Amino acid sequence: MKLKKQVTVCGAAIFCVAVFSLYLMLDRVQHDPTRHQSGGNFPRSQISVLQNRIEQLEQLLEENHEIISHIKDSVLELTAHAEGQPALPQHALNGSWVLPPENRPSFLSVSPQDCQFALGGKGQSPDLQMLAVYSLLPFDNQDGGVWKQGFDITYEPNEWDTEPLQVFVVPHSHNDPGWIKTFDKYYYDQTQHILNSMVLKMQEDPRRRFIWSEISFFSKWWDNISAQKRAAVRRLVGNGQLEMVTGGWVMADEANSHYFAMIDQLIEGHQWLEKNIGVTPRSGWAVDPFGYSSTMPYLLKRSNLTAMLIQRVHYAIKKHFAATQNLEFMWRQTWDTSTDILCHMMPFYSYDVPHTCGPDPKICCQFDFKRLPGGRINCPWKVPPRAITDANVAERAQLLLDQYRKKSKLYRSKVLLVPLGDDFRYDKPQEWDAQFLNYQRIFDFLNSRPDLHVQAQFGTLSDYFDALYKKVGIVPGMRPPGFPVLTGDFFSYADREDHYWTGYFTSRPFYKSLDRVLEAHLRGAEILYSLALAHARRAGADGRYPLSDYALLTNARRNLGLFQHHDAIAGTAKEAVAVDYGVRCVLLQSLTNLKRVIINAAHYLVLGDKDTYRHDPAAPFLGMDETRSSQDSLPERTVVKLGTSPRFLVVFNPLEQERLSVVPVLVDSPHVRVLSEEGQPLPSQLSAVWNSATDAVPNVYQVWGAPHPQPICASLPSCTLPGHSGSREMFLAEGSDRLKLMVLYSGEEDEKLRVSSEFLVYGTRTSKDKSGAYLFLPDGEAKPYAPKDPPVVRVMEGPLFSEVSSYYQHVQTVVRLYNVPGVEGLSLDVSCLVDIRDHINKELALRFSTDIESDDTFFTDLNGFQIQPRRYQRKLPLQANFYPMPAMAYIQDMQSRLTLLTAQALGVSSLHSGQLEVILDRRLMQDDNRGLGQGLKDNKRTCNRFRLLLERRSTANKVQDERPISFPSLLSHITSVHQNAEALVMPVALEKPALPALRSFVPLATTLPCDFHILNLRTLQDDSLPSAEAALILHRKGFDCSLEAKNLGFNCTTSQGKVGPGLFQGLELGSLQPTSLTLMYPLGTASNSTNIHLDPMEIATFRIRLG
């Protein structure tokens, strides 16, 4: 009734406008200045003028008649709309398609206070800023003598007379969860023996110490040992002999991993430790990732760790920091001083024994007692170790002490850390005896000689940091006096010469893409499962809900965690190991299982009558959106069979804000309409499905609908026969050799940017050192990609989107522009289907060139969490200027910013002003001598997905731009999450009339602020069952307001970091307890309200109870 009144009022208003326009036309005739009054007598000339005026009036009346006719049509259309017949897209006179306006306003309101954050960081400038360090260093690689990449170290013998040197030797074994062997093969061949021997050998002498990092291995071993052995482990941990360091599921890669997965594997490890051993990690240990992101120190700090250690840093930076005694520093985030964490950087080439006791590997190798004569490995420097006896202990101890003293000169304190281990060390009891007995003899001698002023012992990592804090007299976690503050990251890594580890930013892109698909499914499954379980418990239906799905969730968490390992997502494992990861993550395990969890949860949540819920694994209520025939195949979408009854679809929006997305569904008929849940037609577009450039798949069609799901909502559009909504297609058999020119608009008609794109090919060197899985060693600048034949180009135009598809020999590109309001329509969708399996030692790159005057500066993200400014360093080789791009990269000048958003981690650079260049795939025939023993020859057909976003900068200034900090715009953030968390479409298996009553499920009482992201809603474990508690993890994003964003169509605002009470509707909030990031420590007091406040960039975890 209310709507009819609105239509009547609107129609009356339009009629009034028409009458008023007619009045104005008459008035215009009456007051014509050329019309003269002459007492009623009209000369012949004036009669002709009057005749012209009458003709003009008739013409105006005719035009007005047309206006009235249009108004009549509009009123009829509006009435039809009110009665449930919405206007479909219209083809305008200029050839473009126009969507009807949204029936409710979309707006974006950003509070001015929320714009202050990006303008300036808090506190003082750091002592060490990595961009400035790079500008300062010559990178000249001079020969340093015995410490080849360093310098000669000298000391005075009496330097320790007043303050003795305190040495902590830390035994460790680095266990890769997959590299040369699979995870299981490593476990059975080596890891289980290491841990079994550890329990026995550590109990032989209470002075012995050991550290362990990878919980994925430890948990597998724990499941296979006796209760007595478990009790022994708890005793060793309790008395400080065994320390669990970092405590993550793996030692994560820090270049390609997304922050969701980094946090998730950290939570999985920490929760396992708390439940099984009752321990909370205190110190971080990362000896093997190939470069370090500043995201990890933030995550460790927020998990309540107080210190951390890193190793693989560019040798020139190590040398510089060693020369200035800056190898230990407080690592700070660029935006806030409360993020400081103490970081220890190891100074030498490697974490093996020859490179950890001091600067001379020839001497240090003599104290790796696994290499005693007669063993399987020896010292490359040709001087073997000697067993320690009473006869030689004095000489051997003095030789080792000299190395300890030299190493200690590189640090500010008189406490020294000396790691003792390597990959898969201590796997035999003999090695435990050889290392621990010989070192204990040396320690006993050193400690018995007061004149040597040294105290040496075995220690854990936290023993070292505790002693350091005690020596300087401060509480753990605080800044030691005189220690520098550092901001920035440690990419890109080189271990020697010009051997930059920048190839692994792209290696095996198929699996990098798969990782993100699995991650998005895990997040969606976690959230839906937690909500479904809470609603089922509230309704007393948890007995009928499949609690067994929790085991599938746990398995998926652990498989995603395993894949964050620095040889997994990095693409640097053996081919068979990569297949093993693929099978775990896709076929046998996680992706299929997560779809099942989502289907089960969505089924329960969309039922109108929950009492009708029955879980039948053999006949799921919903179908899967897509399937994969093998672990290395691309997904195939499910074809929905249409009949006389409508087919219902459940569309799951996993985001916390409303979205208007164009969603594709495959159907078996071209005669299809898409209806909303209420039965109203939705805008839609039909297109063919193509087998190749010229062959369409018979009897399969792609219908694209534009539903408007609410936040974290499962909504119910349907497909039905008959009806027809078509699109216009053009087919071009020939085209130019590359499709180069695009024009991007930033929302203003006059604001355009010319962007050309081209494919390029890098070769590799002809010398002995060539590119491989780790290294990028090109043979010079890239050369234009030259396919055998010109591409076939297909252009398609329609009401919801238009696209250009280009088929080259090795890559198929689709550039799509959506014609919908909101986020989707404001950027270009670019996908590249790459297949370079016939290449030899080639890398395929995609370069975008613009007239943006970016000079030598560009910006890349770290883990999808923060932005790091970069500078092209001309003093470094080309390969040194590539960086990881897990989520986005951009270039800018004073007027514009162009952002490339990616759905998978790849390597990126800007080699010239106005350019962005991304490596799409690499095929390399040889090993690069870093231990893998293989090239990269197992390439797959891989689809890389991007979005190109142009924004106008309204308030840019040079001072702001020169700061070593930058933030994406709000639009860029939201575009990125849209790209990485696509709406999932699940067909309802049943048809009417057997179909039960369904209704959309909307869990949030209100849309969250635009800058808030629900990172996860993760049900916690209680024994082996799901707990009544869940972890709610929120992230408030920092954003730059200087980028203009008009009419963006966000149905959300910002709120100065506040989330009000009553976040979830239909559920009671039993309690909300702020905790540390991984839930190990409570912070503040619990409440039963979601009154939450977060500062920009902060990630916060809450232990919540819903019911």
Image: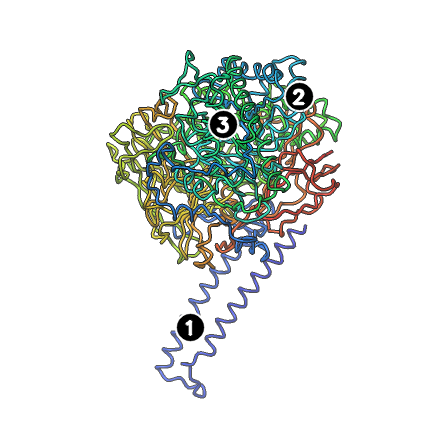
Residue matched to label 1: 54
Task: Look at 56% across and 30% down and name the residue there.
Answer: 450
Horizontally, residue 405 falls left or right of residue 230, namely left
User: Which x, y percent locates residue 435?
Assistant: 51, 19
Q: Earlier in the sequence, mark 2 or mark 1?
A: 1
Callout 3: few (<14), some (14-19), or many (20+) C-alpha neighbours within 10 Å?
Answer: many
Mark 1 or mark 3, which is nearer the start of the sequence?
1
Mark toward the viewer: 3 or 1: 3
Question: How far is mark 3 from mark 1, CA to CA?
Answer: 85 Å
The amino acid marked with disc number 3 is: His
* Gap in angstroms between the C-alphas marked 3 and 2: 26 Å
Task: From the top left corner, tell me how far across and down residue 424 is, in percent.
Answer: 49, 19
Compared with 330, 842 (above or below) is: above
Residue 720 visible in the current orientation:
no
Report the residue marked by disc 2: 234
Residue to which mark 3 is pinned:
565
Q: Quadrant of residue 440?
A: top right
Query: Which x, y percent locates residue 329?
Result: 52, 42
